[in-house]
Amino acid sequence: MEPASDPNLSVPLRGAERTLQLLLFPNPVVQKKMEEAKEIVPPLWREVSEKEWSDWRWQLRHRITTFEQLKEIIDLTSEEIEGIKHSKGRLALAVTPYFASLMDPINSNCPIRRQAIPRMEEFHLSKNDMVDPCGEDKDSPVPGLVHRYPDRVLLLVTDQCAVYCRYCTRRRLVGSHERAITQGNFEEVLKYLRSHRKVRDVLLSGGDPLLLENERLEEILSRLRAIPHIELLRIGTRVPVTLPQRITGGLVRMLKKYHPLMISIHFSHPKEITDQVRRACNELADGGIPLGSQTVLLKGINDKPYIMKKLVQELLKIRVRPYYIYQCDLAMGTEHFRTSVATGIQIMEKLRGHTTGYAVPTYVVDAPGGGGKIPVEPVYVVSRGKGKIVLRNYEGKIFEYPEPNIIEFKKMRANGEEKVVQKKVMA
Ligand code: SF4
């Protein structure tokens, strides 16, 4: 068993974390209220030691799952109270104490609250909602495995997450049993992969693969790595954001053995980038693991260009390369989180050219029903004409690019005029 997380790690400065967020997004009214509120130590954790707080297993064991616990730390609105009551038996409420400590206790529009606390809006089902919005189940040859693209597969290794996001695409699966893939099921997956030699890339997802104990995760990684045609292992996770205590030296030392291994981290808002998260990402990056981010575009949370720009710039500072912005899928009860696609395009318009190219992710729509990710971009090609293309830059200025005229060149060559042209060029 891996030892508990490094006891030297400091406890997140709960009041100070909140103050930092206010520095990022100043709002004098909220700030005043926050100044008053930060003196109130949530009674729920008053007795918690630094060692316990820094231990990911303690965090996981003490997740907030009830209305009674949550009301100890924040002023719940009637929308939230009703949402929590109705969420029983569906995608349940579960929030780590760490993630809950980032919640604004007063403002119900806090992006951390909006993502983690059910609201009544979730129980409105639109005619567009789908149980399996990305059509994963129909592309599943073996339970837990999704094989859609020719050379890569998605392997769902657990249905457990540290925090359940209210907009989760896999809400049909996650949180239902909080169980890892069974050994028998995993053996079936291995058998399938060994016989499909075109598969060169396996993405571990769930639920959250980093909630598995190191030993179980290592068994999965090592047995996949032993398949000769599997070149790349990837992990999709939100744990560095919702449970950064899980990123320990022991975990990183284990992961390092299975390079090339990449990690995609689900970030939603700059408020999520705390000192704890910086430390977690640094440890992973120091382990030589390339880090990318995946962000779901969410109405009222990150659908403003200035928020997304702040997020991608902060991500680069912690060595996470912004990778995807996803249009919110058509999962059941998530219509209130969805923006128009035009909103996403407008955000991309404000990123490309306006910040470092490395900070600009690809905006994609995962085709409803299972067509895969389709990139959506602002239109930069104004027109295509004979021998030229007309382009627009990020400032709206128009430029012409002369294209090589291959047809003309071939005609000249056929007529023996090629040398004449070359001489002209040389002159
Ligand atoms: S971490 Fe991912 S899988 Fe888990 S609830 Fe959030 S979106 Fe769903």
Image: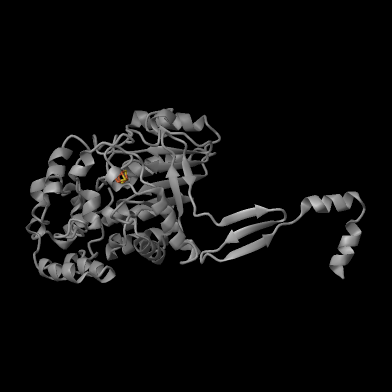
Q: Picture coordinates of residue 25 (x, y %)?
A: 27, 68
Q: Nearer the viewer, residue 134 or 223?
A: 134
Q: Quadrant of ligand 1?
A: top left
Q: Is residue 144 above or below residue 353?
A: above
Q: Nearer the viewer, residue 363 or 160?
A: 363
In percent of the image, x 18 and y 59: which residue is there? 101
Protein image colouring? one colour
In the image, farthest residue toward the right: 416
Q: Picture coordinates of residue 65 (x, y %)?
A: 15, 45
Q: Quadrant of residue 320?
A: bottom left
Q: Is residue 344 left or right of residue 102?
A: right
Q: Is residue 382 left or right of residue 190?
A: right
Q: Is residue 214 above or below residue 301?
A: above
Q: Is residue 89 left or right of residue 137?
A: left
In percent of the image, x 21 and y 38: which residue is there? 123
In percent of the image, x 45 and y 56: which residue is there? 361
Q: Picture coordinates of residue 23 (x, y %)?
A: 26, 71
Q: Quadrant of the C terminus?
A: bottom right
Q: Is residue 93 above or below residue 275?
A: above
**Residue 18 visible in image:** yes
Q: Picture coordinates of residue 131 (x, y %)?
A: 32, 33
**Residue 55 visible in image:** no
